Structures are given as C-alpha cells and as structure tokens.
Image (cartoon, rainbow, N blue to C red):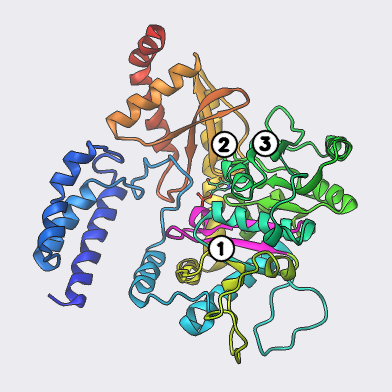
Amino acid sequence: MSFRDDCALTAAALDTFACEARARAGRVIDQPPMAELSERLGLAALIRDGGLGGERLAAFLSSYLAASTRLHHPHYMAHQVAVPHEMSAIAALVDGFMNNPMAIYEMGPAAATIEMTVLNWMLEKAGWRPQPMPGTAAGGDVHGGGVLTHGGSLANLTALLAARARVAPAAFTDGTPPDLVIVAPAACHYSITRAAGIMGLGQRAVRMAPTDAEGRLVPAALPACLDQLQGEGRRVLAVVANACSTALGLYDPIRAVANICRQREVWLHVDGAHGASALVSRQHRAGLDGLDLADSLVWDAHKMLRTSTLCAAVLVRDHRDLDNALREEASYLFHDKAEPGFDFIHRSVECTKAALGLKVFFALATQGEAGMERYLDRQVALAKAAAAYLRSEPGIEVAVEPETNIVCFRFEGGDALQLALRKGLTGDGRFYISTTEAMGRRWLRIALMNPATTLTDIEALVGALRKFLPAAGAQQDAR
Ligand SMILES: Cc1ncc(COP(=O)(O)O)c(C=O)c1O
C-alpha cells in the first residue's frame, strides 16, 4: 500500500466516523479500562512486529475510532475543545507530513508567513497595529507582535513573561524579584496560577482581584486593591482580566479595568483563550470592548475558531515587550543572518514548533470571516435558547445568563447530586457534559462547541438527566 492509499482509507474511515456521529449513532463517550483497550488495539504486537498500513491500518483505525470520544456527535457538550473544521484537520495532516518547525524562517518559510498573517489578522481584530512583514515599510508608530503556541496555558505563561520583562527587566537573568504579584479574579483559569508557580513567583503571589457575586472583576474596587498591595511593598506584575471566564463564560469589564491599569502604569493581560473569538462577531464583540487599551491577549483558535488542537496566540500591543521576554543564547539558531522573513524563536518558550498557523488558516480560508461569525453567533444564540429552556423546566436553576456558548445549571439538591448525575450520564455514554464550581456551588455545565447540536438535543439531555435523578438522589443520600 502507498501513502496515497493509506491516506484514502484513513479519510474514508474518518468520514464514516463523522457521518455516524453526526447522525447521533452510538455513544459519545466510552471509557473501557486502559489495559483492556491496549489489548483490544493490539498495541504491543504492533510495536513488536510493525506492519501498520493497508488492511492492518484499516482494522486498527476501526478499533481506534470506536474507542475514541466523539466530538462530532451533537451530544458532545463537555469541554471547550473545537469540533474541528475538516479543512483544519487536513492542515494538521499537511503539517505532520511536511514537518517544518518554522520558529526559524529558514525551516518553514510558507508556514512562518502564514503564522505572521494569522497573527496580524488577530492583532487587527484586537485593535492593535499589525506587524509589518520584513522588507516592507515599517511606519512610525509602535506595532504589535505575537506568536502561536501549543495551547492557552503556554500562551498565558508567555504573556506573563512579557509583562515580567517590562516590570523587572533583569528577572530573566537574575531571577524573579520576590515583591512581584499578579492580580487576577478567582475565576481565572488555573494556568495563571500555574504560570506564577513556573515563573518562581509562587502561586501565592496571585492575589485575588475584587469581584462581584458572579465572579466578574469590579473596576471600582480595583484601585483600593492596588493601593493595598503597594502599601504591603508589592509591585504588580500584571492585572489579569477574563474574556471570558472558564466556568461561567462571563466577560470582565475590560475598558474600565484597562483605564485603571493605564493610570497606574500596570500591565493588563486579557485571557481571551475562549472568548476572544467573539472579535469576529459584530453581535458579540462588545464583550471585549476596551481590549485595544490592554497590553496582552491570549486567544485560542482551538476553542472557538473550529481549529484542530493545538493553536493559541499570544498577542502584545507593543512587540518589544514580547521580543524582550525570553533572552537566550543559542549560537546555532540566533545569529546575524540576511533575513528575507521573520524568526519567531525568540518569542516562544518552545524551540521546535509546529506550523500551527496552518490549522487556523485552513479553517478561516474555507469559511471566511463571515462563516466564522455565523458559527459563533449560532452557538451563542443556542446557549441563550438553552438557558431560557432550562429556566422553564421545573427543579432546574440556571447559574447566569450566558454571554458565550457556555451554560451552567443544576438540579434542585446538593453538590453531590450534580456530581452523581454527571457520573450516571457519563457512564451511560449517550451524552457528554462537564461540571464546574462557581459562586460557591457545583453546576452541570455545557459548552456548545458542536455546530450540529440543537435545542432538541438539549431537551433530550434534560430527559436523560431526569432518568438518573432517582439513582443520583439515592447516591447523594447515602453519603
Ligand atoms: C480562560 C482560559 N484560559 C486558558 C485556558 C487554557 O487553555 P489550553 O487548554 O489551550 O491550555 C483555558 C482552557 O479552557 C481557558 O478557558
């Protein structure tokens, strides 16, 4: 069998998988014990003997797909991971084949040009000046900059390293000064506190920003919070705003927060891993109003831009902040050379880096901005319709009015009941949802990523959950 034949049979298997899933056939999620699965997939024998390809590849794919979680199934409503556009998956194949680690231009000129173009498209959406292509007229004003990373967590770390370089330029060589703190809402993603740990600030250096009952940053109370930290002899490395929060999908009021940060000369980082994609929507981009006044933004394409994992952007208003963040010596990579293009390597924690831009570019180039906008608007409208329906159902409480495609709700009863309901549902496998803690309580949570999910699917989900209520209630009582 040739590469061409193996690709053809792989494409056929994937297409059948997606068609069946979209037709709501089978379970969304099934988790056989790992040892059993390893046996079923014949992994050890394949590693020992080789020979994957042709008939064996077809057989293997059939078992592999059968044991995979079905994001293409409209009952997939669990996590903020895109149901990728088919063209994005094709881009992943092209990248896997070409293997152009394009952090230095000479290792992938086409991939690097696409990364620059995608980043510039995002910079413009954020309200920042795009970076001129090398060799073109630069213009006078400061321009933005960015880099694509393998995920939002790495992107948040990179943005905070850029903030650190501005506040404490010697930190990269001398270590992080102990007086630095990050101010973030408690509802921030854990990658913010993790970044603090990695950067040597320690997780305790993340100080909680003042928030309202729904976890949104309260700008009016921010100056007092900053004053108090100053009184304690602390320097603020960055204020972090959510756009939107992971659990409830709510946007912090960026403009008001940004104005305070500007007055105080404090770096504002906007974590838009999930919600920055609203910038493509005329209807929903108001959630990010004031973003142009921030210093950095993280935007995951593999969440709401129909892009295969992973592809996240770190964007800064002033490229110099990112260019100064990671100073490394690697004489075989960093040296004076005639540059027809641009090397991203000094902006990236990673050295070898996949051609991530290709995946988001293919998704964009197939649907165009208008197609992306239609997708985003549809998913948010579905979330709002779902919230209205859930509110109309007896015994169900909705956490907040959705601002994105995320809806949190709970059945009358304690936190243990919600967990038991989700456990029952996941074990059954016909629906896949998540849970979260917010506002001091446990909620069932749906992230409506799949463009094939409809309100009827959500009604069916509630029907399924009600079937588990007696068993889940009994489980709760037994605790
Ligand atoms: C607000 C926010 N920031 C960061 C992340 C982390 O992104 P990733 O999973 O790509 O590392 C997430 C993931 O859900 C998120 O919701």
Q: Nearer the viewer, residue 452 or 152?
A: 152
Please give left or right for residue 463 compared with residue 217 in the image.
left
**Residue extending furthest top?**
477
- Say which residue appears at 60% left-offset and 73% top-offset: 329
Q: Nearer the viewer, residue 354 or 217?
A: 354
Find residue 173 and report its image quarter. Answer: bottom right
> What amino acid is at disc 1?
Val
Residue type, numbered disc 2: Ala
Q: Earlier in the sequence, mark 1 or mark 3?
A: 3
Confirm whether the magenta stretch covers residue 165: no
Q: CA distance from mark 1 to mark 3?
A: 23 Å
- Residue at the farthest front position: 174
Frontmost residue, 359 versus 85: 359
Disc 3: which residue: 204
Q: Look at mark 2 in the image and give the residue it sits on.
A: 247
- Residue 282 visible (yes or no): no
Residue occupying image coordinates x 63% and y 26%: 439
Q: What range is drawn magenta here?
A: 294-316
Image point (54%, 31%), residue name: 408
| Rendered residue at 75%/36% (across/down) | 209
Residue 219 x, y percent position in the rendering: 82, 39
Horizontal placement of 192 versus 257: left or right?
Answer: left
Query: Counting other residues with Cα less than 10 Å from the Cα at mark 3, is it few (<14), some (14-19), or many (20 or more)?
Result: few
Tell which circle, 1 or 2, labels the residue nearer the N-terminal end: 2
Mark sitting earlier along the chain (3/2): 3
Which element type, helix, strand or loop, lies under badge 3?
helix
Q: Looking at the rendering, in which quadrant would you find the C terminus?
A: top left
Residue 30: x percent and y percent?
26, 38
10 vs 261: above or below: below
Q: Is residue 327 visible?
A: yes
Q: CA distance from mark 3 to mark 2?
A: 21 Å
